[in-house]
Structure formats: C-alpha cells, structure tokens
Image: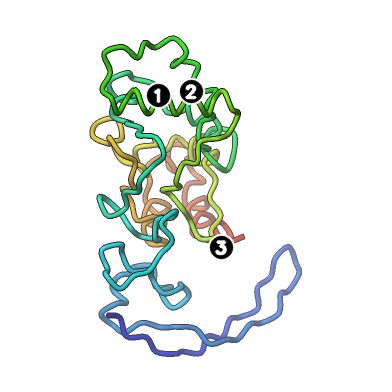
Amino acid sequence: MAHWKSAVLFATPVVVAGIAIATIAGTVQAQDPEVEEAFPTGLHYLLPPPVPLLSDPERSWNDERVAYGAVGSEGVLEQPIHYSHKLHAGKLNIDCQYCHFNARRSIHAGIPTTETCMNCHKVVPTEGRSEQAQADLAKLKEHYESGEPIPWVKVHDLPDFVYFTHKRHVKGGVACQECHGQVQDDMTVAYRVSELSMGWCLTCHESHPNVDENYGARAELRRAEMKDCWTCHK
C-alpha cells in the first residue's frame, strides 16, 4: 500500500496570450519515495492517486469501466457481443479505419455503428458457424433492425481532465498498434495493452521518431510544445 503525505504546492502565475492567471496555492497528495519511482515525469505530486488494478481484492469498481491503469488480462471486460480483432483485423485484413473511421477526423475513434458491421454481415453466411457465433450474429441483426445501438463496454477510458485527440496522432503517423497493441495478431477479446499514464504518454512525446520526420528543424520546438501541460490538460 502506498503511504501518502500532504504537501503544499504553490503554483506560479501562468501567462496565456498576455493574460496573467491568478496564482493558485493548495494542498496536494505526495507519495513516499518507493511510490515516486512509478512516475518518471517528476510531476508525480500533481497527479491523482493511482487506482489499484483489478486484481486488488479490496478494489470496488464500476463493472462497466476499466480502472485507470488496468492492462492485459486484468483489463478484460465482458462485452454484449463477442468480437475478435484477431479475426477481423488479422485474418480478414480489415483496415482499422474502416470500422473506426472517425479516428482520422475526430477526437474520438468511435465505436462502429451496427450499419458498419452489417455492410459485411448482410452478405456473410452464418451456416457452419459455432452456436456462439450464430447467437452473436443474431444479436447484431436484432440491434440493426431495432435501431438500438449495441451497448459496448468501454475499454480505453481516460480521466476527464485529460485531452486526447485521435485525429492529431493518426495524421502524425502514429500507428494504432503503438497504443492499442498488435490487435491483429492475438486479440480475440478487447483489452487495454498500455497503461495510458502521464509518464507513458510523455515518453512518446519526448522521443517518437515521427516528430523529427514531420517537423525537421522545428522538431525540438514541437517536442517542447508536446510536453507542455496545456497540450493535454485544456
């Protein structure tokens, strides 16, 4: 268990577009030295306490959300319809952005609509499938005909104080697999591969090779901007 102690943080005035924002002083939570090692950014005392992983027997959580930081098999949640990325993105070689078409144009990648699923499943035969597959496809058809969206359970969930845009990353040449893992190879059930922590994001912002390729001589200036608090915390 982490031992927490109070610390007083005095924030210096911030100037945005020539306007000085008032100085803020407040009490925040600082961690003991053992826990501090988990935050390589040096800003650990500004972060909320980490949420225990799902393996923690004392952790009480909402079954419809993955606790921040839960990765691998501990981040697997039961979905209303079984879906295999290994089959669709791997064996069938369906491009990620065919289903998640908002990723290149919006903040959110989005969950594909039942209409998108039925573009293929209207003509894909169900004969010879397993009982589970036929039951899942029947559910898909029911949702399509009723117009009711499938209540997928969210796997990748960020805190409200974090701003993230898929569009910026896709246009910057960041592959889906860099954050979501090799879904086409082994992901028969959706789960979180990366912890999506502040330090994890900053590691990429500090050293991703695409920054040099995209910005050339201005790469270091861009990296400084990418590490600015305002970039991710609007």
Mark in the foreground, 3 or 1:
1
Say which amino acid is labelled 2: Lys
Residue 191: mark in rendering = none
Q: CA distance from mark 1 to mark 2?
A: 6 Å
- Disc 1 crowd rating (10 Å Cα; few below 14, some 14-19, many 20+) is some
Q: SS at mark 3?
A: loop
Residue 39: image location, x then y, percent: 34, 69
Q: SS at mark 2?
A: helix
- Disc 2 crowd rating (10 Å Cα; few below 14, some 14-19, many 20+) is some
Say which amino acid is labelled 3: Phe
Q: SS at mark 1?
A: helix
Task: Residue under label 1, please give it.
Answer: 137
Task: Residue under label 3, please give it.
Answer: 161
Q: Which quadrant is the N terminus positioned in?
A: bottom left
User: Where is 42 relative to 24, above or below?
Assistant: above
Say which amino acid is labelled 1: Leu
Residue 141: mark in rendering = 2
Q: Quadrant of residue 82?
A: top left
Check whether the beta carbons of the residues at disc 1 and disc 2 lie within 8 A of each other: yes
Residue 4: image location, x then y, percent: 37, 86
